[in-house]
């Protein structure tokens, strides 16, 4: 059974964590309960609440499928994902996912992103805005900020993506092999924009899959004003670097 799983699973779900002890067991079990087999890589930034220790316990139940990379300190979402991407490429995965630990992304939608890439997309985005505004439990101010941020990003970059700050994404490995991971600059929400922009500039096929985003019910949000500012001003920086051929 385990050997069949290893042979079948072509995708790995990267989940960065910092103080997610309240969510980690449930999210891991939810991914492994899906019909499509996935591996899971937890990239933990030395959470003081014992998140990584919980993952080590769970590895006893999922020794082949569940993986842990523990970093020394909290170093930002972008660097956690780049760390995970490099690990996934090294371990020969064909489909590489970004997903939050807090159930704001429905694990069941992993299968829809996966099938979008199997059917021809190079990047499949779990989009909150492609069929209206599909966000639950956010205050109106945050919905408007996120929605209009995507309009602003598209205006500056020339992309036509409804949800440019989305953090629920499936990549084919050739995308991550092509876009120079060592040159990724941003570490917060601007990281999500930069990844899409670099993918767009390489003319990969980007598809948006409608999802419903539900804000976390357990644990602390990682959103801050500095993260929002990075996203707003980072877009201009990306465009300037492109004009100067420095991307």
Image (cartoon, rainbow, N blue to C red):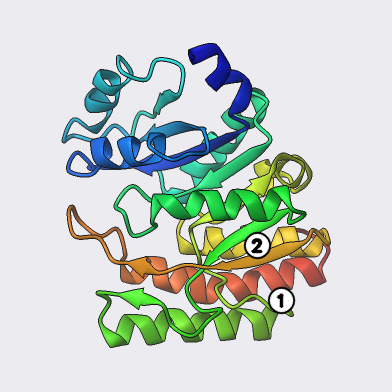
The picture places residue 92, in percent across and down from the top left corner, at 68, 25
- The image position of residue 156, as x and y in percent, is 67, 82
Residue 74 seen from this side: no
Give the residue at mark 1. Answer: 159
Left or right? Give the position of 85 relative to 40. right
Could you tell me which secondary element the residue under label 2 belongs to? helix
Q: Are marks 1 and 2 in contact (CB under 8 Å)?
A: yes
Task: Please indicate whether residue 18 sits to the left or right of residue 182 in the image.
Answer: left
Q: How many marks?
A: 2
Q: Residue at x 49, y 86 (%)?
A: 148
Q: Is residue 83 left or right of residue 171?
A: left
Image coordinates for residue 118, horizontal then vertical, percent = 71, 47
Q: CA distance from mark 1 to mark 2?
A: 9 Å
Residue located 74% across and 48% down the image? 179
Residue in view at x 74 percent, y 53 percent? 119
- Decide which of 176, 170 is in the foreground and name it: 170
Based on the displayed image, in which of its 4 quarters is residue 146 positioned? bottom left
How packed mark 1 is, by other alpha carbons closer than 10 Å (few <14, some 14-19, many 20 or more), is: some
Residue 55 is drawn in which quadrant?
A: top left
Q: Position of residue 110 (x, y in %)?
A: 50, 50
Q: Earlier in the sequence, mark 1 or mark 2?
A: 1
Residue 112 located left or right of residue 48: right
Q: Nearer the viewer, residue 65 or 191?
A: 65
Above or below for 122 versus 136: above
Tell me the element at label 1: loop
Q: Is residue 208 above or below residue 61?
A: below
According to the image, label 2 marks what residue? 196
User: Which quadrant: the C terminus?
Assistant: bottom right
Q: Is residue 42 visible?
A: yes
């Amino acid at each position: 059974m385990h050997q069949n799983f290893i042979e079948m699973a072509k995708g790995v779900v990267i989940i960065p964590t910092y103080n997610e002890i309240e969510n980690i067991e449930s999210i891991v079990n939810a991914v492994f309960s899906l019909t499509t087999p996935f591996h899971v890589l937890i990239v933990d930034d030395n959470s003081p609440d014992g998140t990584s220790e919980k993952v080590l316990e769970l590895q006893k139940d999922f020794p082949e499928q569940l993986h842990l990379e523990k970093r020394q300190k909290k170093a930002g979402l972008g660097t956690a994902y780049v760390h995970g991407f490099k690990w996934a490429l090294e371990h020969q995965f064909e489909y590489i996912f970004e997903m939050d630990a807090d159930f704001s992304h429905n694990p069941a939608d992993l299968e829809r992103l996966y099938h979008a890439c199997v059917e021809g997309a190079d990047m499949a985005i779990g989009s909150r805005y492609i069929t209206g505004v599909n966000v639950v439990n956010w205050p109106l101010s945050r919905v408007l900020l996120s929605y209009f941020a995507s309009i602003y990003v598209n205006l500056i970059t020339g992309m036509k993506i409804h949800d440019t700050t989305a953090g629920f994404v499936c990549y084919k490995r050739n995308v991550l092999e092509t876009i120079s991971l060592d040159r990724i600059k941003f570490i917060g929400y601007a990281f999500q924009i930069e990844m899409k922009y670099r993918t767009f500039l390489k003319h990969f096929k980007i598809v948006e899959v409608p999802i419903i985003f539900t804000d976390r019910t357990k644990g602390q949000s990682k959103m801050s004003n500095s993260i929002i500012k990075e996203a707003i001003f980072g877009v201009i920086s990306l465009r300037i670097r492109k004009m100067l051929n420095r991307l």
